[in-house]
Image (spheres, grey):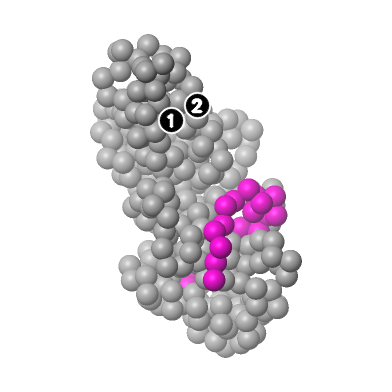
Amino acid sequence: MEENEFWADQFEQNRAHLRAVAYRMLGSLSEAEDAVQEAWLRLSRSERSGIENLGGWLTTVVARVCLDQLRARRSRREEPLEGQLPDPVVSPIDALHPEQEALLADAVGLALLVVLETLGPAERLAFVLHDMFDLPFDEIAPIVGRTPVAARQLASRARRRVKQVAPAADSDPGRQREAVEAFLAATRSGDFDALLAVLDPDVVLRADTGPGALRVAQGARRVAGGAVTAAQHAQFARLALVNGAPGMVAYNPDGSLRGISAFTVRDGKIVEINVLADPDRLRRIAVPPLE
């Protein structure tokens, strides 16, 4: 019993790190938890006396589980970017919970996760493990069944894709918050011109309303027009941190969740908005009380 308690304690010390790896790999909070739980089950069934570096061993197990899951998505001909947005992590506007700080270390915004969804499974794994968690390619190579040189090439291709597609955000949280607050105020008042003033001319909005129902709108006038039509719903919206950056949570009049919006702000303008509005998924996402 004492030995089992020892290993359980050691596992708990690695849990936050493993959740962070799995969340970046899968973009799903529930699937990330499942991957972490699978790592515990494999540890409990393994000959543990041969494990010299538990953290590295667990990271490898979680990475393999996630890689299998990503490949299974591909085999089912799912296209994650076209089918659904990643799960957002919501916190009060002024502070992240300590557990969420570990989950969102390195500012893993929703826009970045959206780009990661476009990568191949092996590319995503190589990029996440190397660029986000500093794993050497010698350790990544056996997981993806490639040589270290080939694993490096996978990460390099993924890195180029991220740089090409992921919009760079302002580093100043205050400037980000000002833009989101201006967007919310203009939406509430139905002020089309004020919305145009805070939106980048080429802004992209993605709205995930359910399985296979990801709608994309591009251009400030189109996005502003959609916001004006939602003015009555914006009265029930609240500022929040969404994946560590200023965002918005909208409620229905009965208090149920209507949508969670993540914003990317560059040079004071909103360049990307990702909205999760799938009622089934919203019911599974924990949202703390917001003022």
The image quadrant that residue 34 belongs to is top right
Residue at x-position 61% and y-position 72%:
237
Q: Quadrant of the C terminus?
A: bottom right
Residue 288 is a magenta residue: yes
Residue hosting label 1:
62
Asked if the residue under mark 1 is in contact with the one under mark 2, i.e. CB atoms within 8 Å, the reply is yes
Q: Which span is picked out in magenta?
A: 270-291
Whole-percent x, y for residue 66 in the image: 48, 32
Residue at x-position 51% and y-position 63%:
262
Residue at x-position 62% and y-position 67%:
250
The image quadrant that residue 97 belongs to is bottom left
Q: In the figure, 186 relative to 279: above or below?
A: below
| Residue 177 in the figure: left or right of residue 206 | left
Q: Return the residue nearer the eye: 121 or 191.
A: 191
> Within 10 angstroms of label 1, few (less than 14), some, or many (20 or more) residues?
many
Which label sits on residue 38?
2
C-alpha separation, residue under disc 2 versus residue under disc 1 = 8 Å
Residue at x-position 62% and y-position 81%:
188
Residue 262 is a magenta residue: no
| Residue 10 in the figure: left or right of residue 205 | left
Q: Is residue 109 visible to us here? A: no
* Residue type pointed to by label 1: Val
Residue extending farthest right: 254
* Residue type pointed to by label 2: Glu
SS type, badge 2: helix
Q: In the figure, 233 relative to 83: above or below?
A: below
> Within 10 angstroms of label 2, few (less than 14), some, or many (20 or more) residues?
some
Q: Is residue 15 visible to us here? A: yes
Q: In the figure, 144 relative to 216: above or below?
A: above
The image quadrant that residue 132 belongs to is top left
Q: In the figure, 153 relative to 173: above or below?
A: above
